[in-house]
Image (cartoon, rainbow, N blue to C red):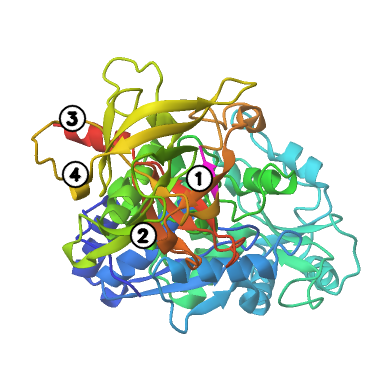
Amino acid sequence: MTAPDRQTASDFIRDIINDDIRTGKYGGRVHTRFPPEPNGYLHIGHAKSICLNFGIAAECRGLCNLRFDDTNPAKEEDEYVRSIIEDVRWLGFDWQDRLFYASDYFEPMYDCAVQLIRAGKAYVDDLSADDIREYRGTLTRPGRDSPHRNRSVEENLDLFTRMRQGEFEDGSRVLRAKVDMASPNLNMRDPVMYRILHARHHRSGDNWCLYPMYDWAHGLEDSIEGITHSICTLEFEDHRPLYDWFLDQLGVYHPQQVEFARLNLSYTVMSKRKLLELVEQGQVTAWDDPRLPTISGLRRRGYTPEAIRDFCDRIGVAKTDSTIDIALLEHCIREDLNKRAPRFMAVLNPLRVVIDNYPHDRTEQLEAVNNPEDPAAGTREVPFSRVLYIERDDFREEPPPKFFRLAPGREVRLRYAYIIKCVGVTRDNHTGEVTELHCTYDPATRGGNTPDGRRVKGTIHWVSADHAVPAEVRLFDRLFTVEDPGVDDFRKSLNPGSLRVVTGYLEPGLAGAAPGIRVQFERLGYFCVDSKDWAPERPVFNRTVALRDSWARIEKQLP
């Protein structure tokens, strides 16, 4: 289990746990769990819960389990289990030998249900799902007793046994807890504990056709594993009385459920159902599409576990829902990669430059800094020759005010190289588009020297055309065009420009870059070699994030 990267600020959950340790509740133990349902890939919201549960356990020298809530075989797959295990490990956390599944407890859960039936606290109901919903009532109208609520213990035991044996069709019967149909809390109005579902389970196969509901399984799993603090998101707050009721009626070990606000992030959706729709409808390529907020998508895009843990630490833990600006997440990865990512030059929208007074047959190696934030990173050699590529945006025939890059008759400094001056322009005969620049260079200005003291304001990057490595570069933007795409039909606000693919020309030092390597393309942003579509003969780079950092500017303005 990995401890937090830095000192974590206090919050109401940590205050509760620290008080429990002080008073000796649970014998001073702290034992948490992260309980995902394997019905999709984890996203950044789950990362918050992972960091919270594993982080608190590490801080308190306690334990944290990884437990799969695999109670719905119709939606769960081994693929999701494998992806979740990979994601939690990648984030830096270890559950040691405490990997559990709800399906591990199907037999004791069943026995506990029989215990409640014998105690007159549970009954088999023949009402349909629609009828159960109607009988339950509303917030202003109390529920009504099912006509099957007062079946005898013997009849309920017989029917429940036959439900397990597979005698009845899906949806024909359920087991319900006998609580209070007049309760102001709708969750307490005889909730369903078991439903019939003839579906093959990814672990237990066809052994069961009777599956527990989450509210019934959740507390029992926590109790069996000796969990001390069952940390849940805020939507389960109204379910806590039922959590307590089940454990009290059974007379078993009783953990404490504590709720916190889930993570909402601007310009994205955090619902696994909506993410699954995007995948199934082909709006994205897969669960690990770098435009998605899934942990696997963020990893493929170039995010680091350190940046995600830092983000989760910064947003803290609250009791009320709020939406976090995605700019903060982008700031965290910039701040992390700024310290560690080596710099390279790359041109993504090339314009050919010919240096007329540079020898045709000459190539020289220029010294470039690998990372100015890390003196230990050293330097590298970059080839320079007569023909270069620069960014097309770094040239204007009619430059606007305060444009300090290249223009006819103007000088600009080439990064790590020489000062050049534009002396001519070549155009396409049909379109009139500029296809090539002709420049001269000043040999005395190598490496930034200006012996005559003249001032050149603009510095641009470049690559040698003879040595450049062509690469596919994927430029990702936000997947949605509005801050809260969940308000209306989220598909209507999909960003048609969320992915743009270009051919870039890179320094030769990036030839054969391995999957997952993260770099900064100077002046363009941070990029990562794609881990899925990579090929040695043609690397694929994903843009992790651009260099512009709005959140850093916001932080500077804060009191």
Indicate which disc residue 52 carries.
2
Q: CA distance from mark 3 to mark 4?
A: 39 Å
| Residue 346 coordinates in the image, percent (x, y) | 42, 48
Dot 1 or dot 2: first in sequence order is: 2
Residue pointed to by mark 4 = 445
Dot 3 or dot 1: first in sequence order is: 1
| Residue 109 coordinates in the image, percent (x, y) | 64, 73
Residue pointed to by mark 1 = 235
Q: Is residue 480 left or right of residue 31?
A: right
Q: CA distance from mark 1 to mark 4?
A: 65 Å
Q: Is residue 341 visible?
A: no
Residue at image position (68%, 61%) is 122
The majority secondary structure of the magenta stretch comes to: strand
Q: Is residue 396 left or right of residue 277?
A: left
Dot 3 or dot 2: first in sequence order is: 2
Residue pointed to by mark 3 = 557
Residue at image position (77%, 67%) is 210
Find numbered disc 1 in the image and state the secondary structure of the residue it sits on: helix
Q: CA distance from mark 4 to mark 2?
A: 54 Å
